[in-house]
Image (cartoon, grey):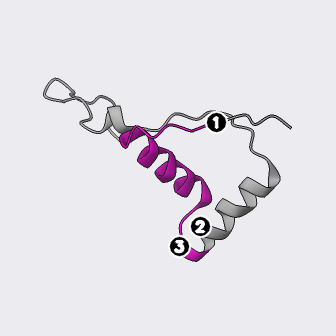
């Protein structure tokens, strides 16, 4: 390793804005099991699959339709 490095000609990481942010999310067991099963079938990590699903929802500006029905 060098003692010093010259970063004067360096540039910002062009992918920095695409980096992921770690968060905590609470999911019920059935939902988590569903995504883990899908991820296993697709051979991708389940967190990646959840991220892809949420990204698709965000890009498509999908909204949840919640209608409460009287009992």
Q: Quadrant of the N terminus?
A: top left
Q: Quadrant of the C terminus?
A: top right
Mark 2, secondary structure of its residue = helix
| Main SS category, magenta section | helix
Residue 56: within the magenta?
A: yes
Taking the view exactly as shown, the residue that stands out farthest to the left is 9
Query: Residue sitting at 30 percent across and 28 percent down?
Result: 4
Residue 43 position within the rendered picture, expressed as x and y whole percent measured from the top left: 54, 73
Give residue 21's mark.
none
Q: Which residue is mark 1?
A: 66
Mark 1, secondary structure of its residue = loop
Residue 40 position within the rendered picture, expressed as x and y whole percent measured from the top left: 62, 72
Q: Residues within 10 Å of mark 1 (few under 14, many from 20)?
A: few
Q: Which residue is mark 3?
A: 42
Q: Residues within 10 Å of mark 3 (few under 14, many from 20)?
A: few
First in residue order: circle 2 vs circle 1: 2
Residue 65: within the magenta?
A: yes
Q: Which residues are magenta?
A: 41-66
Query: Residue sitting at 36 percent across and 38 percent down?
Result: 18
Query: Residue sitting at 50 percent across and 52 percent down?
Result: 53
Q: CA distance from mark 1 to mark 3?
A: 30 Å
Mark 3 in CB contact with mark 2 (< 8 angstroms): yes
Give residue 39's mark.
2
Side of 29 where 15 appears, left or right? left
First in residue order: circle 1 vs circle 3: 3
Mark 2 in CB contact with mark 1 (< 8 angstroms): no
Mark nearer the viewer, 1 or 3: 1
Q: CA distance from mark 2 to mark 1?
A: 27 Å
């Amino acid at each position: 390793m060098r003692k010093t490095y010259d970063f004067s000609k360096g540039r910002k990481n062009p992918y920095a804005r695409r980096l992921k942010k770690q968060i905590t999310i609470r999911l019920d067991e059935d939902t988590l099991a569903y995504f883990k099963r899908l991820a296993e079938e697709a051979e991708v990590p389940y967190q990646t699959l959840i991220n892809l699903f949420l990204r698709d929802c965000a890009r498509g500006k999908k909204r949840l339709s919640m209608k409460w029905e009287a009992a």
